[in-house]
Image (cartoon, rainbow, N blue to C red):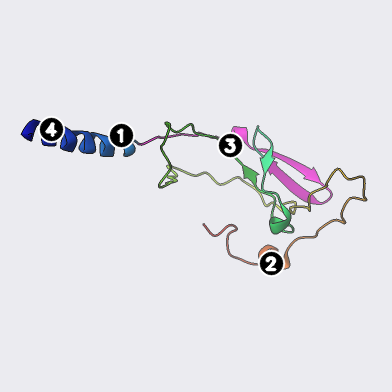
Amino acid sequence: MKRQISLIILLIFMGGAIQAQQITQQFTFTSNDVQTVQSGGFDVVGLPDDSYLQGEEHAGRPQLPLIQFKLLLPQGASASDVILTINSEQQLPGNFYLYPVQLPVYPNFSNPPDFVGPDTAIYNSNSPFPGN
């Protein structure tokens, strides 16, 4: 009986250790990876994969480049925390007037939405965007 109880306790602790696995994903960029293009009086700043902040809820905000990735978790596992660590940063030389995020164009053959101008609360602010 003691052996069964010990085995059950050991399995419980092992199960807890399996759930506490850590997955790490590292991305490295240099200033050579950043591309800037002028478009209609705005600057479009991008990374090689051409993903950007988009969506109706972001219309008018600065269009920022994104890195999207997927992680495969073990079967039955779920993510409990995501931690972003920036080891170093480098400021791009120059001043940029970033292109604002536009409303999405849906393929229903209707007219595309009108141009959405910059959100003045963000563009006229001295605070960094996004704040975090």
Helix, strand or loop at label 3? It is helix
- Asked if residue 24 is positioned above or below residue 44 in the image, the reply reads above
Image marks 3 and 4: residues in contact by CB distance under 8 Å: no
Circle 1 packing at 10 Å, graded few (<14), some (14-19), many (20+), is few
Please say whether residue 61 is visible from this viewpoint: no
The amino acid type, in three-letter code, at marker 4 is Gln
Q: Earlier in the sequence, mark 1 or mark 3?
A: 1
Residue farthest toward the left in the current orientation of the protein:
2
**Which residue is denoted by mark 2 in the rendering?**
124
| Residue located at (48% from left, 31% from top) | 72
Distance Cα–Cα, label 2 vs label 1: 50 Å
**Which residue is denoted by mark 3 in the rendering?**
31
The amino acid type, in three-letter code, at marker 3 is Ser
Q: Classify residue 91 as left or right of residue 65.
A: left
The amino acid type, in three-letter code, at marker 1 is Ile
Circle 3 packing at 10 Å, graded few (<14), some (14-19), many (20+), is few
Circle 2 packing at 10 Å, graded few (<14), some (14-19), many (20+), is few
Q: Earlier in the sequence, mark 2 or mark 1?
A: 1
Disc number placed over residue 97 in the picture, else none: none
Q: Classify residue 11 as left or right of residue 35.
A: left
Q: Quadrant of residue 7?
A: top left
**Which residue is denoted by mark 1 in the rendering?**
18
Q: Position of residue 42 (x, y in %)?
A: 78, 51
Please say whether residue 79 is visible from this viewpoint: yes
Image marks 3 and 2: residues in contact by CB distance under 8 Å: no
Q: Position of residue 99 (x, y in %)?
A: 75, 51
- Asked if residue 94 is positioned above or below residue 49 in the image, the reply reads below
- Residue range (magenta): 22-45
Disc number placed over residue 4 in the picture, else none: 4
Distance Cα–Cα, label 3 vs label 2: 26 Å
